[in-house]
Image (tube, rainbow, N blue to C red):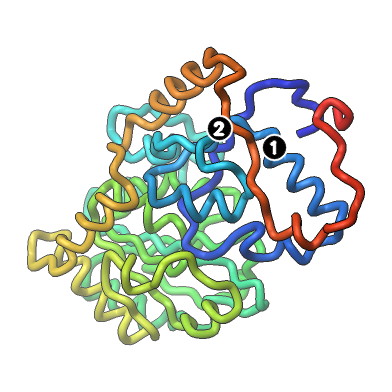
Amino acid sequence: MGATAGATLVQLWHGLPLKTIGWDAEWADEPWAVRRCHRYMAAEIDLVTVPSTAAIEPLSSGLGIDPERFAVTGYPRTDVFTDEIDVPNVTVDEQVIETVEAHGDEQRVVCYLPTYRRSGTSFVDALDVETVGEQLVDSDAQLYIKAHPYEPVSAAADHPRVHWLPASVDPYLVLGHADVLVTDYSSVLFDYLAVDRPIVLFSYDRAEYIAERGLYFEYESIAPGPIATDSPSLCSALDDALAATRGQNDPYATDRRRRRERFCPIEAGDAAAAVHSEIRQRVFKPAETEPSKSVDTPETVDNAGEQPASSTAELR
């Protein structure tokens, strides 16, 4: 950040946060020098892109950036959900995409993207692969799991219908081929609303996770689909979701539409152009009319009496 030499900095971030981040999570407990670096970096950000106005308050609070520096553009990564975007397979083995596409031509594809647990526990302990695999056989579907790189999945149970994606794979290049998404507290659930396909929440440890990490939104209020708490209820939810993809009853269609209007109103395929347009407008905006770049954080009180942070010029 210190080497940007005054360039316009755009923070694309990585999702509308459901779980708390930054100053609302762990930053306030970091050493003084780390907290100062976070303040400096927040002051350097000129623009933060968000998918909806609902994202501004939590991101502003968590990152310590003034709300006026946020712009509703959508996230460019969701542009891959449209057929018009020609996506180079930069981080995905071409064979992986071909396999997923082949499965999608003949069967239904489910993508499971679990959140990383800082407590050291793993979703692998809660997922009964054999039971879920048999449900996939009955529903004629394939499941692709993309775990966090730190997740210990090397010894995970195996099933012919369950596939473990490598840590290096960009999940969004696979997610566009999925008929159903399974996740828990990940911001991917908001992004996937753009395609209006069934979403199942597998939150087997909700009470413990919320107590440890905290959420910006009440969980039931943002749920766009059923909430499963164990493998049997996950199988039942998957059965209903996959049936909905085949034209049968879709009881969560209205919930998805309402959540999409609130959290993901920008059409997939338009975000990259919207970000570019917003950058051009802000770059040519007169400097004297620009709002301040950062907001007060809990550190302002914690560091009372400390020597003031250096100016941007001094830090450069």
Quarter assignment of residue 226: bottom left
Q: Which residue is rendered at x = 79% and y = 62% of the image?
A: 302
Residue 103's spot in the image, x, y percent?
30, 53
User: From the viewer's perspective, is residue 299 above or below residue 311?
Assistant: below
Q: Is residue 45 left or right of residue 299?
A: left
Amino acid type assigned to the residue bearing label 1 in the image: Ala
Residue 37's spot in the image, x, y percent?
80, 46
Residue at label 2?
47
* Residue 292 visible in the displayed image: yes
Q: Which residue is rendered at x = 35% and y = 28% of the image?
A: 85
Q: Secondary structure at mark 2?
A: strand
Q: Which mark is residue 52?
A: none
Q: Residue furthest left?
A: 248
Q: Nearer the viewer, residue 181 or 303?
A: 303
Amino acid type assigned to the residue bearing label 2 in the image: Leu
Residue 165's spot in the image, x, y percent?
51, 57
Residue 282's spot in the image, x, y percent?
52, 21
Q: Is residue 277 left or right of residue 285?
A: left
Quarter assignment of residue 30: bottom right
Q: Secondary structure at mark 1?
A: helix
Residue at label 1?
43
Dot 2: within a 10 Å radius of its alpha carbon, few (fewer than 14), some, or many (20 or more) residues?
A: many
User: From the viewer's perspective, is residue 167 above or below residue 88?
Assistant: below
Q: Which residue is rendered at x = 57% and y = 31% of the image?
A: 291
**Image quadrant for the N terminus?**
top right
**Image quadrant for the C terminus?**
top right
Pair 1/2: label in front: 1
